[in-house]
Image (cartoon, rainbow, N blue to C red):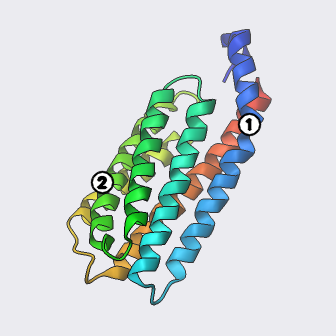
Amino acid sequence: MENSTLSGQERDAIKALSRYWWLWLAFGIGWIVISVVILQFDQASVTTVGVIVGFMFVGASLQQFVLAGLAERLKWLFAIFGVLFLGAAVLAFISPENTFAAIADILGFLFLIVGIFWIIEAFAAKEVNPLWWLGLVAGILMVALAFYTGGQFFIDKAYVLLVFAGIWALMNGITDIMRAFQIRRAGTLV
């Protein structure tokens, strides 16, 4: 990123955003903690799975709404994802034991949406982010997980659901931690 190509307003916006780099770091650490908790269950009940996934969706929703509030452009896109994640959380909390099979379908759909979002985000950041390809790889993996998840019947495979939810949380955490340090660095370059 070259200082001479940025206007004063753009520099100010980057500096303002870079002050909040720690938000991405905190969300990333939170996602990784959630993934570790999920991936360590050995005999989780159906209710526990529904509640944990519901909290994951609430966290993802809050994160998207924070991003919508901080973003200069595409606020509507972050808000739409926030609403989608919030809707998934409500469905998970209504009746976790009765919606366990539906959670698998919701995860497949949301994995697809998240994967597409990460792919678009990677290409959008290509010019300013030398690690853009990591977001692209994570997005492609998430889309692959979406199709695999959509074709499974998780009523008999509760552990598979936990593994995929854990992988999603882990990938989200790693991406957010990388983004935190990229945002912090961008603030020092302007």
* Residue found 31% across the figure and 70% down from its top: 99
Pick the quarter of the image with the N terminus.
Answer: top right
- Classify mark 1: residues with Cα within 10 Å, few (<14), some (14-19) or many (20+): few
Residue at mark 2: 109
* Residue found 74% across the figure and 10% down from its top: 8
Q: Is residue 153 above or below residue 76?
A: below
Q: Is residue 71 left or right of residue 88?
A: right
Q: Between 24 and 131, which is closer to the camera in this rendering? A: 24
Pick the quarter of the image with the C terminus.
Answer: top right
Q: Residue furthest front?
A: 94
**Residue 125, percent from left and from top:** 52, 32
* Residue found 56% across the figure and 51% down from its top: 175
**Residue 96, percent from left and from top:** 39, 72
| Local secondary structure at mark 1 | helix
Question: Mark 1 or mark 2: which comes first in sequence?
Answer: 2
| Local secondary structure at mark 2 | helix
* Quadrant of the image occupied by residue 182: top right
Q: Amino acid at mark 2?
A: Phe
* Residue found 46% across the figure and 63% down from its top: 54
Q: Amino acid at mark 1?
A: Arg
Residue at mark 1: 185
Q: Is residue 136 above or below residue 30?
A: above
Marks 1 and 2, Cα distance to the nearest angstrom? 34 Å
User: Is residue 130 visible in the rendered structure shown here?
Assistant: no
Q: Between 75 and 140, which is closer to the camera in this rendering? A: 75
Query: Residue 17 — which label?
Result: none
Q: Nearer the viewer, mark 1 or mark 2?
A: 2
* Quadrant of the image occupied by residue 89: bottom left
- Classify mark 2: residues with Cα within 10 Å, few (<14), some (14-19) or many (20+): some
**Residue 157, percent from left and from top:** 29, 81
Q: Is residue 108 above or below residue 75?
A: below
